[in-house]
């Protein structure tokens, strides 16, 4: 695919390196169009030290690297989430980053264009996974599993317009918990909401609310308002935008783009204003229009039971029955839910953080059967934590508070004040590593003591071992606390136990 | 891209579901060719309950799901590896699963055809990452970092012929540790080998050996043997197969496929038989032919220093200077190394485990400069642990020993012997969760006690709380040990402390 004359790329580079001293890099510019145009430019030969870079080093649109600082934040958050999933008895699962395209089609419908497809390189048609739910359903069907409580943490990919400022990316991490199996109604559903509450409380993101609705109530509402059944999903997709758009704009889209009669839209408009607790559920049972829909009444009955369980779990006040909640994904069949942050964690006067929903989920009773050749049903309910947005909030909080994070966990630094002590330092540090102690030293033969102590201060390393001629002769080392600058002399043979004692006291 | 007549997929499914009771799934077969042919077949309408599945549910070639059992093994292994990386002061990093294709070309040369390319969907040309080394070099150049000690754990993708029986996949996890920066020679290189030893010893995979060579010795050897410089990389690629093929077959490939003169191949043949410790390094300094190559002598001098440091680290006996070691990747410039298992961990009489190398790495001083517009060099050395192969070995060991793993961590099960105790169970379990205790219950209104106790035995849950009418009236619960079947009565208000006491004693 790529030709640089007759000489293969690297050999050419090697040849050029020999011709020129100091060696210069061969820069290749790949111009993306239908084919690929490769152009080899020897920077130093043409315009040494003046040429602009021939390509811009960057990551793909909507993706990002996570720096060590970000990784520390991410690890803490993921740990808390995974602990919660394990507290609820979930098993781990991992699935490939890509699936056969035919496994994913039919599952997302309108979002199919947002999928990353791979090039057909002589064989299978593959797409990167769009969420962790469809692969889970595929796994259940493929292994003929009738029940499973699993969690999965992994990246998913969607070609949406990235709004990076708000923590929305094309590559992002999801943390999913799902309960598959035929059980008595609303018990697993209630546990999903309990998990959401535990995680959001545990992460201390400020006050939150979980909106709850039911796809059967949504569909029943459409039916009694007079939406033609063929428009259900399209209208649902419009309604899903209510967290970002006003009802006025959504109504406009329904009427103008989706061809809904204005009076039908207005009837919907009356319902989507409604939100409240268990009393609103009771009220809707009495609603002259909605009570005509068998589907809606089924959904309301389940919600009533759900609220009963949520009360026993002590989380009912966190839950709001909200008739405007639609959820974008097609596979939901029953209860749906979405958590939003209420209080902005930023200080007064700061820019408000607009992060949208931070967790969502629902019941999808028909998805597994779409993979099963005999159409066997495995009812499922689950939730997904939008960790990227949570990372963003926590990072912003840390920026505001000026909190610093250590990016390494090093406990002890091995230093010397004298020349020619590399050998001793290497022996000492190996001893520490072998004892399980986290230790570092500078990769220099003869480093300056000040440089070494500065390194410890910058990196937040609490302890320093100092070795020199005198110490070596006496069979001791100096152990120094970086914070207090206190030094004690320790016998070489007691070194490990002394360090372990100090570290356990921290 | 996908059309099913005029009705969108899901709406069509919904329509059909209404026509037919019981509802049947719409199966879509996507026939892969240049375009996509979609064929909708309504199974139940054509041949109800007899039709074979219209598509086979499977994962893409060379990929796999990791089951909960496998996830437990994997988590334990990754924990040990990451602990070791942190013990050596490494920072975490994450990079996107795909990179701009132009970032990856030039870096792998012959392996370029093994890359998974994404479809150009109007914009960037992207490829899934092939390793974690090139993204790390790209990260350093992009952020103008002159030094960094980082670890990264993540999936990489290579379209090689999968030999799944041996733990080789097209999607696999790598655990990388790298030291970037200009340092005194061989100190970071020695640490990389120390890390490999710590990890392989810690995982108790049996005896192992780390082969070491230097790219400059390889190239010097080629030069003095009379290999034309244009053939260096091609001959290197052949030599890299020596762990899977005999010298006879590799020689044949060199002569017949790569057009090397037979006498030149034979000269190489003499060298590739050589392996040994520091004494072989000394011996090669005296080799009349090899000592003529300035490059090779540079490499030998570094290896001599390396062996000195390895002796101080106490690992010299694990390291073998091996002139047959070539390493397939193009970017190496200095020391290269590869760890192989010596003793097969399986029991006598079992099938031998052929897993090839389990860890490898080397020095790549010119890779970062390939990304830098000014060609600034950042010398690097690093290692990669082939965890899939390690997973495979550990799984085989567990199969042989019949060892069982718990796939959940649940500590307490909430049970009842009586009907109508769902509410009490829900209240109790929420109390446990809120106290951080890992707890489960059955999602049934009125489960049988025996079913509940069986569940605990199957899942290895150590403690059961039993609640019934009598207990409720007396304000107590029964706490049962699943293993001993002993039961004690505990006051409701002491429940949490009593459980925590019991769990801390385990």
Image (tube, coloured by chain):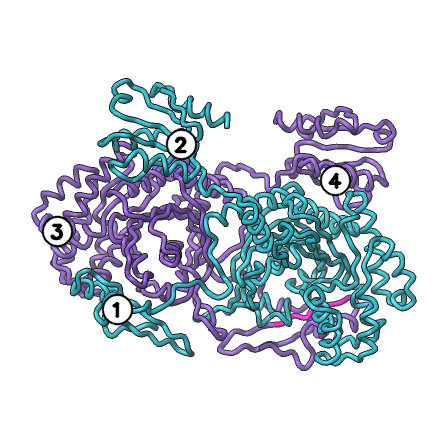
Chain colours: A purple, B cyan
What label sits on residue A355 in the rendered view?
A: none
- Give me the chain letter of mark 1: B
> Considering the image in quadrants, where does the C terminus of chain A appear?
top right
Q: Residue at x 32, y 61 (%)?
A: A372
Image: magenta residue range: A23-28
The residue to which callout 1 is attached is B43
> Considering the image in quadrants, where does the N terminus of chain A appear?
bottom right
Label 1 residue SS: helix
- Give me the chain letter of mark 2: B
Q: Can residue A354 be seen in the rendering of this structure?
A: no
Q: Are the residues under badges 2 and 3 in a single subunit?
A: no
Instruction: Tell me if residue A289 comes above or below residue A47 in the rendering.
Output: above
Mark 3 closeness class: few <14, some 14–19, many ≥20 residues within 10 Å: few
Instruction: Place residue B444 in its image quadrant.
Output: top left
The span from disc 4 to disc 2 (Cα, nearest Å) is 42 Å
What label sits on residue B412 in the rendered view?
A: 2
The span from disc 3 to disc 4 (Cα, nearest Å) is 72 Å
> Which residue is nearer to you in this view: B370 or A344?
B370
The residue to which callout 3 is attached is A294
What label sits on residue A430 in the rendered view?
A: 4
Q: Residue at x 75, y 26 (%)?
A: A494
């Amino acid at each position: 695919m790529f030709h640089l004359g007759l000489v293969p790329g690297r050999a050419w580079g090697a040849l050029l390196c020999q011709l020129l001293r100091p060696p210069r890099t061969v820069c290749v510019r790949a111009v993306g169009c239908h084919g690929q145009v490769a152009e080899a430019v020897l920077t130093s030969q043409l315009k040494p030290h003046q040429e602009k870079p021939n390509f811009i080093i960057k990551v793909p649109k909507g993706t990002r690297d996570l720096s060590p600082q970000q990784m520390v934040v991410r690890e803490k958050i993921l740990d808390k989430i995974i602990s919660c999933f394990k507290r609820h008895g979930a098993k781990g699962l991992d699935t490939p980053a890509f699936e056969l395209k035919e496994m994913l089609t039919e599952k997302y419908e309108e979002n199919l264009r947002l999928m990353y497809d791979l090039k057909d390189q002589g064989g299978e048609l593959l797409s990167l996974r769009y969420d962790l739910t469809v692969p889970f359903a595929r796994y259940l069907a493929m292994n003929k599993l009738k029940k499973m409580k699993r969690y999965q943490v992994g990246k998913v990919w969607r070609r949406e317009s990235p709004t990076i400022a708000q923590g929305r990316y094309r590559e992002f991490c999801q943390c999913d918990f799902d309960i598959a199996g035929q059980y008595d109604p609303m018990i697993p559903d209630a546990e999903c909401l309990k998990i959401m509450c535990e995680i959001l409380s545990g992460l201390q993101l400020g006050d939150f609310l979980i909106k709850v609705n039911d796809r059967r109530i949504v569909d029943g509402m459409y039916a009694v308002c007079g939406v033609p059944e063929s428009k259900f999903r399209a209208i649902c997709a419009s309604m899903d935008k209510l967290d970002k758009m006003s009802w006025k704009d959504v109504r406009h889209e329904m009427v103008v783009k989706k061809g809904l009669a204005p009076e039908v839209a207005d009837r919907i408009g009356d319902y989507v204003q409604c939100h409240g607790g268990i009393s609103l559920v009771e009220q809707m049972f009495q609603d002259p229009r909605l009570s005509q829909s068998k589907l809606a009444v089924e959904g309301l009955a389940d919600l009533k039971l759900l609220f009963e369980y949520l009360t026993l779990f002590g989380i009912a006040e966190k839950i709001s029955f909200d008739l405007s909640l639609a959820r974008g994904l097609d596979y939901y069949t029953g209860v749906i839910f979405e958590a939003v942050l209420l209080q902005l964690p930023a200080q007064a006067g700061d820019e408000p953080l607009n992060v949208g929903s931070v967790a969502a989920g629902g019941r999808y009773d028909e998805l597994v059967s779409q993979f099963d050749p005999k159409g066997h049903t495995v009812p499922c309910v689950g939730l997904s934590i939008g960790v990227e947005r949570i990372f963003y909030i926590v990072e912003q909080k840390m920026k505001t508070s000026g909190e610093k994070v250590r990016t390494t966990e090093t406990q002890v630094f091995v230093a010397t004040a004298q020349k020619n002590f590399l050998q001793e330092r290497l022996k000492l540090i190996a001893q520490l590593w072998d004892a399980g102690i986290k230790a570092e030293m500078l990769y220099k033969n003869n480093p300056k003591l000040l440089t070494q102590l500065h390194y410890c201060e910058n990196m937040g390393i609490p302890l320093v071992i100092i070795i020199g001629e005198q110490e070596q002769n006496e069979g001791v080392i100096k152990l120094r606390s970086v914070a207090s600058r206190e030094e004690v002399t320790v016998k070489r043979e007691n070194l490990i136990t002394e360090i372990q004692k100090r570290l356990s006291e921290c």
